[in-house]
Amino acid sequence: MEEYNLTCIRCPMGCALRVSVAGDEVTVTGNTCPRGADYGRQEVTAPVRTVTSTVPVTGGQIPVVSVKTAGDVPKDSIFDVMRDIRSASVTAPVKIGDVIVRNAGGTGTDVIATKAVGIKD
C-alpha cells in the first residue's frame, strides 16, 4: 500500500489529506467536503494542472499578453504545452478569451488570452 500526504487546494480550508492506494482502491481521509476526496483521488491517479504563461505581442501597447490553458491538462503534458506556448506570438489587438494556441501540446485544450492588449499608438 502506498500513502500520500497532501494539502487540498480545492477551497480555502486547505485540508490535510491522507491518500492511501492499494491496487485499484484509493481511500482519502482528512477532507471536510467531497471536493477534497475528489482532489486527493485525482492527484494520485491522474494529476492535472492549469498552465499559465505569456506570449509576445507584435504592435501592442505592451510587449506580452498573459495566457492560460482553457482547462486542466495532464501534468505529464505540461512541457509539451509550454513548447507550443513558447513558439506562439500574436498581433494586437488581443481580446480576453482569444485562442492563442489550439490543442496545446496535443492535449485537446486551447491556450487563451487572459488580458486585453490594444494596438500601440
Image (cartoon, rainbow, N blue to C red):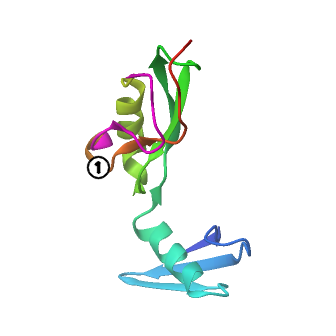
Secondary structure at badge 1 equals: loop
Q: Position of residue 94 (x, y in %)?
A: 45, 31
| The magenta stretch spans residue 3 | no
Q: Amino acid at mark 1?
A: Thr
Pick the residue in front: 29 or 104.
104
Residue with the mark numbered 1: 107
Range shown magenta: 90-104
Task: Residue at 45% x, 62% y: name it.
Answer: 47
- 65 shown above or below 110: above
Q: Is residue 32 left or right of residue 21?
A: right
Pick the residue in front: 87 or 47.
87
Q: Position of residue 21 (x, y in %)?
A: 47, 79
Q: Which secondary structure is most common in the magenta stretch?
A: loop
Pick the residue in front: 58 or 89.
58
Examine the rendering and report whether any part of residue 35 can be seen: yes
Q: Is residue 5 left or right of residue 117?
A: right
- 98 shown above or below 94: below
